[in-house]
Each structure stands twice: as structure tokens, then as C-alpha cells.
Amino acid sequence: MEKSEEEVDIEQISFGAESFAENPEPRCPCLLLLDTSASMSGDPINELNSGLTAFKEELATDSLAMKRVEVAIITFGPVEVKKTFHAASEFTPPHLSTTGNTPMGQAILEGIDLVGERKGEYRSNGIAFYRPWIFMITDGSPTDAWQSAAAAIKEGEKSKAFAFFAVGVKGADMETLGKISVREPLKLQGLKFRELFLWLSNSMKSVSRSVPGEVLALPPPSGWAEL
Amino acid sequence: MKTLLDDAGLPVRLGSTLGSGGEGRVYTVASVGGDSNTADLAAKIYHSPVSPDRRKKLQCMVSGQSDPLQKLTAWPISTLSDQNGSVCGFLMHKAAEAFPVHHIYSPAQRKREHPEVNWDFLVNTARNTAAAFHAIHAHGHVIGDVNPNLVFVSRDSRVRLIDCDSFQIFGKGKYFLCEVGVPHFTPPELQEKSSFSNIIRQANHDNFGLAVLIFHLLLMGRHPFAGVYTGSGDLVLEKAILDFRYAYGRNARQKQTKPPPNSVEPSILSQTIRLYFEQAFSAAGAEPDGRPTAQDWVSELDAFRTQLRACDDNPNHHFFASLPHCPWCFQEQHLDISYFIPLISDHNGGSFNLIRVWARIEAVPPPKSVNEFTYPPFSITPAALPPEAQFQKIMGVLTKVMAAFLAFGSLITLNPMFILTAIAASAGLLAHRTDTNKERRKREHRLNAARKAFSTLHAQWKREVGDGRFEEKLRELERIKADLEALSRQYAREKDLLQSHSNHMDPRDLDRLKQNFAQKQQQLQNDLLAGPDQLKNIIQASQAQRRSLSTSLEKAALNVAQAEADMTVL
Ligand SMILES: Nc1ncnc2c1ncn2[C@@H]1O[C@H](COP(=O)(O)OP(=O)(O)OP(=O)(O)O)[C@@H](O)[C@H]1O
Ligand SMILES: [Mg+2]
């Protein structure tokens, strides 16, 4: 009896390990990189906030996605980790407000690190996972050096470490976005954040239960993107 | 809703939506031929026009229906046609009051939504799932797309397989294929196929998916191939399946994989079940008919069901009777994971569900964190000096000049007149000093008082208007929760102690102990039940407080600004 008491003290159970035991479903991580620079003030940030709420509500309609999709949020600038990865069932949309400039490069690099760390936790806890998505939304152009971020994205896409998507809101520097993202950046129609997040949620649902074959049939982004 | 006709030509009216998938939408049925006694029926209507091949498949399924299929699956009872006579869907049995099997094999969701489900229920569900698979196979069909949403479980652990129109159907001398599949449930021999569109699936393929489902049900939602990979790089689940890297298997070490930390291992199961898993997940299993069949599983799980027993300490812990200890108590005591939570009656006669109560506490939104107190810029005119002080100020200057002059004069002349006048003038200077000093002291005093008043109010603001009180309460509730969780363990320990200390234990001692703990438990439960309201009250109080405090604070800030300005004129 005493011996086992000792074991308990030595064996440190991290919160992560415990929650993985209670929900060992394969994870589908989705990192949102959100531009909250001053230019997003007013309607854009309000629409972004309500889009996040719609995102959660839509995920909640799918009990399997709720256990599998994990959401994290990094805002910039300044770069701030608003939400670390948690199962969608534990995700409460934050209320974002605007600040500062657009250090997009730094945000991307930190985002890639965050995804890498989470994958490490999955690995050591025996949790299967789908390719993470990094989803960036911006209305400006980077105010910092973005070249190393672009290189990191290229590398990550090549090794299938993650998939990176960029969405430009009115005023975004689409040309630079095109240089940063390997995938063609998409331009948001007006302020259709809600439609964008509904699409993202439905895409995450399909990712979290994909069928064999390389190409994943995602719903077309025609409801929110200028094509 | 447009009219639909069933195979007998009877009009079918649809009710509300039950669910929707990639291919169709599923509805309740309001009536068939005017008869509304249709609560046990459902109808699937496809999103897009039905192809001739699918129509033939549905017709073949309808004509091949049987009692066991109708009981264990949502098999098509009749096709449904639109007013043009084209088939657009089918009628089937509704999975009534049922939920997808992943709702109960996933511990967190099971505890939250089905806390009454214990391990014996999960064993039963596994057995019933195997029985449903067996019925399909016995008819020459194959499920093909085994996945967590396939099996619907009702409250008595009976199951019904849904999405039957995607199964591989054998009829009229041909196969209607199943063209889909979920990789995590796909056997190794099919893992590398780029598509299922021309593959005839075998029951042995289903038996892989079945073993994976049973593994999830018996072993707390874990996937048999989701282990910790000790090789380098990432190992995706599909690849682990392909390589036969069964994480709990005999050869796991050779395969560079091991069970996840804190997982419940197959050692809590019977020898035969463990062997079945080994077989189903091994290379030998991938050979034709290599895996345990659905029927094998039914007989073994039937035998296993009768060998379970309830734990002495926690009656809701069920486990294989041949084990020396309760594995769920072990998990609780050593790893701090409670897989099965006790349902204890509370004073209301209902049952207290910690997970649910805690969820209610967590659902109370914390108050918005309050930024620093800000106030508008004040425009302030310093208060004029009182008339004496003002007069004294002018007089003071004059006297100063005079005194200097007189002092100088008296120095060089040493005339007593001069000296006397000089003394008088100096006295005047002093008099002036005392007057302005008085005013300054008064104003300084006022400034200090204003600052003190402000900082007192500000501290109160920070304490009461921010999320301080809320956080404090939340911490307290967390402590109560931890105490409550520790209680049953503490009880077990003290009971052990009591029993080990006395050879002839007085049963009354045990009763007293029990009563004592029951009281403690009641108290803690009540405290938690009151939690959500207490948190809401704190938020309300802080909002009211915020309104009244911000008015007072603004006044206090104005006072400070005024007092500071008043100092500048001196
Ligand atoms: N017989 C039934 N009883 C109750 N609910 C059902 C029944 N059949 C289907 N549903 C509900 O409808 C949803 C969709 O059904 P189903 O999976 O058959 O559609 P689908 O379009 O073929 O989907 P998928 O593309 O996933 O195969 C199910 O997840 C379930 O919630
Ligand atoms: Mg289907």
C-alpha cells in the first residue's frame, strides 16, 4: 500500500495526458491566425467575432467533430496566443479587439511552433492525428520580415506537416500573401466571415472522417470567396 | 413537402429531420397511407437523383429483407418515389432513442451524457454489435464502410446498424458494391487501394472493422493501432494498420510501438478476447477468412458477459471476475482517472452527477475583465486664494523690499530708528509667511485626503468590479470538487483501516463511518450545486457595484485633479 502511494507521487500526470485518456479520439488540429491590427476595427472585427461564434456552433452539430477538431487562436499584432489547442467541445470563442500593427511573419512562425508542440503531445500520448490546418485571415500586409515565414510554410507543406491557407479581407496585400502561402490565397467577399467559418467548420468535419485517396473533397468556397 | 409513394402506391408524408449526411437527408415519417402509426419509421431522401444502379440496389435490398435484418439494421422496407415515379429514397426502421456508438465508447462524452452506462453495458453493446454484423454476413452481404456512426445504440444496449444503402449487397447473382470506407477502420489489405469503386469486399474485411469497434468499446475509446511509436518520424494510423503495428500486441516492441501512457490494456480481458484481437490485427488475420468472425465474437462475448462482477467498493465498477483487483479502482487510485462515476442518490432522491454539475459551473461566463478605470479629462480652474492671503501676498512683496532696504540702511548707519523699523518690517514678513503657509497646509491636506479617498475607492474597484471575486469563488468550487472526488478513495482507505485494526469489527463502526462520509458528501454536493447561482450573483453584484463605484470614483478623481490644480497657484 505504501509503495503505491509513492508511485502516485512520482508519476506526474499532466492535464493533457488525463484528458487524452478521457477523449482518445484522433485529433484534427486547426490553428487560426487572425489579424487584429488597427485596420480591422469596426465592422470587420465584429464580423470576425461573430464568425468565430458561428464556427463553434456549427462544429457543435457534429458530435464526432466535437471530439476530434481542436482549435487554437493566435492574433497579431502584437502576436498573442489567445487559445492553445483544445477539443472543440472545450473551445469558447474569444472576444477579439483590435490593436497594433501586422507582424504576420512572426505570427506564422509562432503558429508553426505551436502546431509542432501539439503534435509532440499527440505523439507521446499515443493520439492519432490528421494533418493540421493553419488558417490565416488578414486585411493588410506584413509589417515585419515575412520571408522566413514563407520558407517555413513551403517546407511544412512539402513535408505534409500542415496545410496553410490564407484569406485576404478587403485591403489585404494579395500579392504578398501569394508569396507567403503555397496554396492560392483566397479573397473574402465583403465581410462574409460567417460563411467563411461555416465552410471551415464543414471542411474540418470532412477532414476528421476522410475517405481514402489523396484528394480530399472539400466543399467549394464559393459562398464566401471571390473566385 | 411533395407527395411520395411507397411500393404499394400509398402516399407517405414526412415529418421532421433526423439527420443529414453526404448522400441524403433522413426524416421521421408522419404517415403512410393516412395511417399515422409510424413512429418507428424513418425515410431517407437522396440529395441528388438516384442512378439506375442505385435504384436496382435498393429494389434488391427491399426484396431481400428479412426479420433479423429488419430487427438489427435500418434495412430498406420500401423504396419511395416522387410524383414522376422516379425512386428518390426509401423507408426504413428508425433507430429510436438511440445514439451513435462513439457517444459511449468515448469516456468523456459517456460520463457527460450517459453516466449510467457502466462497463457491463459496453460489453453488451460489443456483443450486440457483433450479432448485427453476423446477421449481415449470414445474408451474404458485407458492410464495407465500418465507421463510428454506423452503429446506433439504444438505452438497453441493443444496436441497429444504419446507412445500409451503402453496404455491399449480394443479390440476383451480382454484387452491388460499397464504394466508401473510413481509413481508421479499413483493414491493412485494403489500406493501399486508391479507391473502392471496383473492389469486392469480404466479410473478413468487416471483421477487422468489427474488432476495432469492439476494442474501442471495451478499452475506453482507444484505437488498437494508436500507440506511441518509438521509431523516428511520424507514423500515421493508416500506416500503422498497414504494418500490423498493433500497439498492445505480443510483437509491439518489435514493431516499435507501445501502448499510450495511462491506457487501459487488454490484460483486463479474457484470454480468448486477447487472442482474438491479436489475430484480427495480425498479418495472419489478413489472409482469407483469417480473422475471428462476427459469430466468434458473439459466442465469446456471451461467455465473457457472465464472468463479470461488481466491485465491492464501487458497485458501478464492473470487471472480469478472474482479475485479482478492480481495474477501474486501480485507474482511479494510481492514475487519477475515473472512468465510471458513481451515481449517488442525493437528498432530492435524484442523482448527483459531478460531471454535469461541474459543466453547469463552467458554463457560467466569467465577467468581462475590467480594464483600468478611465475618466474623461477634467477642465479645472484652480480655486482663488482667500482675500487675506492675496492681500498678504502683495504686502509680502512690498514688505520684503522694504525690509531689505531698511536692513541695508541699518547696517550702514547703525541708526536705532532704522533698526527698529527693520525689526517691525521683518515681523510683517513673518506674518505674511504664516498666512500663506496656512493656506498651503490647508490645500496640501485637501490633496492628500483626495488622493487617499481615490486610492481607497480604486482598490475597491479592482477588487470588486474585476473578475477577482469570481475567480476566488471558482477556485473555491474547484477545491470542493477535488475534495468530493477524493472522498470515495478516503472512505475506502478508512474502511480498510477499520477492518485491518479489528479482527472482530463492530458493524456499527462501519455504519458510523458510512454515515459520516455520506454527510460529508452531501455537504460537498450541496456546495457544488449552489455554485452556478453563486457565480451568477457575483457577476450581478459586480455589475451593480461597477455602476455605483464608477460614479464615486469619477468624483474622487475630479477632487484629486482639483486639489492638484489648487496647489499650483501657491
Ligand atoms: N434509421 C435511422 N434512424 C434514426 N436516424 C437515422 C437513421 N438513418 C440515418 N439517421 C440519421 O441521419 C444521419 C445521416 O444518415 P446516413 O448516414 O444514412 O446518411 P448518408 O447521407 O448516407 O451519410 P454518409 O454520407 O455519412 O454515408 C445519420 O447520421 C443519423 O443521424
Ligand atoms: Mg451513406
Image (spheres, coloured by chain):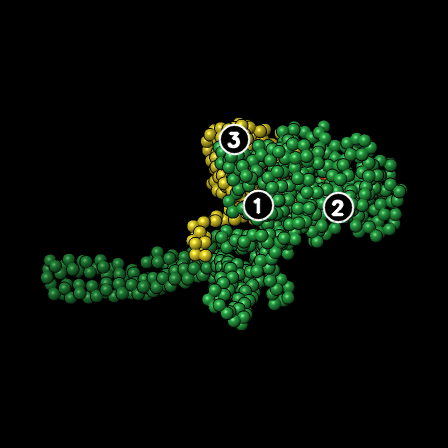
Chain colours: A yellow, B green
Amino acid on which the number 2 mark rests in the picture: Leu
**Disc 2 designates what residue?**
B72
Q: In which chain is the residue bearing label 2? A: B
Figure quadrant of residue B237: top right
Badge 1 and badge 2 both on one subunit: yes
Looking at the image, the residue that sits furthest to the right is: B9
Given the image, what chain letter belongs to the residue carrying mark 3? A
Q: Which residue is mark 3?
A: A156
Amino acid type, residue under disc 1 in the picture: Pro
Whether label 1 touches label 2, CB < 8 Å? no
Q: How many neighbours does mark 3 have within 10 angstroms: few (below 14), some (14-19), or many (20 or more)? A: some
Q: Is residue B160 left or right of residue A46?
A: right
| Disc nearer the start of the sequence (1/2) | 2
Q: Residues within 10 Å of mark 1 (few under 14, many from 20)?
A: some
Q: Is label 1 or label 2 in front?
A: 1
Question: Can the viewer see residue B30?
Answer: yes
Label of residue B266 in the image? 1
| Viewer-closest of B133 and A192 | B133
**A226 relative to B560, above or below:** above
**Percent x, y of residue A13:** 48, 49
In what element is the residue under mark 1?
Answer: helix
Inter-mark Cα distance, 3 to 2: 47 Å
Q: Say whether residue B328 is left or right of residue B207.
A: left
Disc 1/disc 3 C-alpha distance (Å)? 37 Å
Q: Residue at x 50, y 69 (%)?
A: B504
Residue at 68%, 40% (x, y): give it: B293
